[in-house]
Image (cartoon, helix red, strand yellow):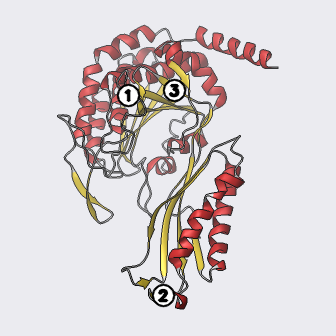
Amino acid sequence: MKKIFLIGFSLMALNALAQKSDLRPLVSKKADAIEQKVIAWRRDFHEHPELGNTEVRTAGIIAKHLESLGIKVTTGVAKTGVVGVLKGGKPGPVVALRADMDGLPVTERVDIPFASKVKTQYNGQEVGVMHACGHDSHVAILMGVAEVLASMQKDIQGTVKFIFQPAEEGVPAGDEGGAALMIKEGVLENPKVDVIFGLHINSQTEVGEVTYRPGGTMAAVNDMKITVTGRQAHGAYPWSSIDPVVISAQIINNLQTIVSRNLNVTENPGVVTIGAINGGVRSNIIPEKVEMLGTVRNFSKEDEAMFIERIKTIAIKTAEAGGATAEVKIPYSNHYPVTFNNIALTEKMLPSMQSTAGKEHVKLKPPVTGAEDFSFFQEKVPGLFVFLGGMPKGKDPLKAPSHHTPDFYLDESGFVLGVKLLSNLTLDYMAMKK
């Protein structure tokens, strides 16, 4: 059976290679020609980051660039999003390409000339703002793709929809934004999208490398809030209390048994993390209430349902055992589905990735327990989300600063491969559909 599958896959790969776009050499030439322009865009965005749903400056630069290329532009989508539509000279499918625009409430520590000095208010605190996840590079790369493809518009066999998305990192509780709001406002319609491609830079993958995974590639995420209510008392007389601090500690420990005892770890990974716990105001008062915030990660709908049920049962019953009550809100403020790469699409586009980056530089990767709201697009249309190397060559991935940290750093020499990759995925997919 395995041999038959491999033969079938090889035939599919050969067929896909035979249907490559003949515009590839031109894509490579044009991408190389604008490499420094892409880097300059990225540096500008990096120096002037904006948090989710406030990407006004970023959106303005994007819209102006797309309009200069003759691309039809819509602004204000999902608050600050920008959508460009490039209709090719020949009929064919509609391919969407997505880049996220928002920065993070992180104070930059990297010693570079274009380091962010931006400050803003976030959750009632003054914070630094930094592109600590590489969204600035995603925007610059997609702007480069737009310039490359617009220059060969008459030869394009279909329509390209450029989606510049705000608020991928999430929005405050009660607010809307990101991919879900763009979809709600019709970003996948008029014209109707057939397929969507996206990429994410990775600071711990060497430049020149592309990694991918068919099926579940990034986790579904639910955040949660657990409120434990007991009885307040003087710290000197704990027997007069129902102590929510002790009960919360028991809940935290008991939650870890979900992964160790309820999850089939041979099939999919999973994570339960309590990231914040707040209760009490001074050392000698046992408080009435403790609040915990956490995150849950899964790779299947079945595991997600199991985790939610077990979290509620463990929190509520542990609290009851101590004489307290527990209220569990999950999701509390956000939920992202599994970032699921359509398996047939991934197999079909693998030769395109390999011929762009070199077969030896395209590698299968393990699941990632981080989450991505690109997953909302993939729930509606077939999608492929891949990772692009951004770590300097020869550096130890274990020592390279990770995403969402003050020391996050990217080697800009990898950006041009991103331009070529998204351009070729678009044109090769169209060639397969002619």
The mark found on residue 211 in the picture is 3
Above-or-below relation of 286 to 265: below
Q: Nearer the viewer, mark 2 or mark 3?
A: 2
Work out whether mark 2 precedes mark 3 in sequence or the reverse, and give the earlier one.
3
- For the N terminus, the quadrant is top right
Q: Position of residue 346 (x, y in %)?
A: 60, 26
Along the line of sight, the residue nearer the viewer: 91 or 29: 29
Q: Is residue 360 left or right of residue 307?
A: left
Asked if residue 145 lies left or right of residue 387, the reply is: left
Q: Nearer the viewer, mark 2 or mark 1?
A: 2
> Is 232 on the left-hand or right-hand side of 343?
left
Q: Amino acid at mark 2?
A: Gln
Secondary structure at badge 1 equals strand
Q: Quadrant of the C terminus?
A: top right
- Disc 1 to disc 3, how far (Cα)? 12 Å
Residue 232: mark: 2
| Residue assigned mark 1 | 390
Which one is earlier in the sequence, the residue at label 2 or at label 1? 2
Q: Amino acid at mark 3?
A: Thr
Which is nearer the eye, 228 or 298?
228
Q: Counting residues from the N terminus, which is met first, the one under dot 1 or under dot 3?
A: 3
Q: Pointer 1: residues within 10 angstroms few (<14), some, or many (20+)?
A: many
User: Is residue 428 at all visible to an observer of this figure?
Assistant: yes
At label 3, counting other C-alpha atoms closer than 10 Å, the crowd grade (few under 14, some 14-19, many 20 or more) is many
The foreground one among 108 and 65 is 108
Q: Report the residue at 56% width, 61% height from top.
A: 331
Q: Quadrant of residue 342?
A: top right
- Give the x, y percent position of residue 286: 45, 83
